Image: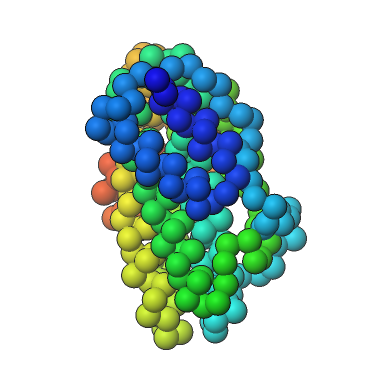
Amino acid sequence: MTTLSQAACTVLLCPDPAEKCRLTRAFAKDWAEGRITELGDTTPPDRPARPERPVLLPFKEMPRRSYGGERGRVSLIHALAHIELNAIDLGWDIVARFTALALPRAFHDDWVRVALDEARHFEMLQDLMGRLGAAYGDLPAHDGLWQAAEKTADDLMARLAVVPMTLEARGLDTTPATMDKLSRNGDTMTPPALDIIFNDEINHVAAGVRWFTFLADRRGMDAKAAFHAVMAQRYPAGLKGPFNHEARARAAYPRDWYEELDRNR
């Protein structure tokens, strides 16, 4: 019988984005409906399988993003689709990588659900690109998100602090302005998709905060102090405001946790 960690690794080792999404839906349904019941202990790969395209470039070599015209829209949507594809793998990786911690089922429920959301987001963005005569892989992308995963593979608290609570939370800060720019440029297709992603990401950030707090409590630590300690070690450059306090509050993200790390203070 397939275990959840085996299912996670099957997704991680699948290079084809469409099949990765299909497998995510199938395994998430099997877990939710009780056909997968055991967590198992299958070790995930250091890196997920990837298609031959897009070409991965260093972040500093990535073309400047535009918001105007079809070319600019394709560039933006492609970048977002790449983030979502990585996020599918991040959801499954967190399920399989930390099995030794004996976490509650609710933890795995949350991250399987996150992976499922990210698959839906990727397919939605891929559909938008298709309407514009493009597809995922047509443009270069960077590997920053998975590099963050590699740097936090040794500690779940670090993974939660850096990925959902910092990188995904940054999306809550920037997405409304992006939607506004696109709307002012006459784009009526992309903002509704970004609004769906934005609201789902609030739940993902909330899961990060919830399980970071759970782990801090389990270890007898003050959660805020633990977050600041992890960030000092793993994200020493600090955070960049301005912050979307309303969206972060919806994610139950305490304002003093992140605001005190604003490097512009």
Count the numbered circles shown.
0
Please determine whether, in this image, residue 7 is positioned above or below residue 83.
above
Please determine whether, in this image, residue 156 is positioned above or below residue 29.
above
Q: How is the image coloured?
A: rainbow
Q: Residue at x 47, y 31 (%)?
A: 8
* Image coordinates for residue 212, horizontal then vertical, percent: 38, 29
**150 relative position to 260: left or right:** right
**52 relative position to 243: left or right:** right
* Image coordinates for residue 184, horizontal then vertical, percent: 41, 83
Return the residue nearer the eye: 185 or 265.
Answer: 185
Q: Residue at x 26, y 27 (%)?
A: 34
Q: Is residue 198 visible?
A: yes
Residue farthest to the front?
Answer: 1
Return the residue nearer the eye: 247 or 211.
Answer: 211
Q: Residue at x 46, y 35 (%)?
A: 92
Please determine whether, in this image, residue 180 is positioned above or below residue 96.
below
Tell me the quarter of the image containing the N terminus: top left
* Image coordinates for residue 142, horizontal then vertical, percent: 66, 54
**250 relative position to 102: left or right:** left
Return the residue nearer the eye: 17 or 45.
Answer: 17
**33 relative position to 183: left or right:** left
Q: Is residue 159 visible?
A: no
Return the residue nearer the eye: 18 or 236.
Answer: 18
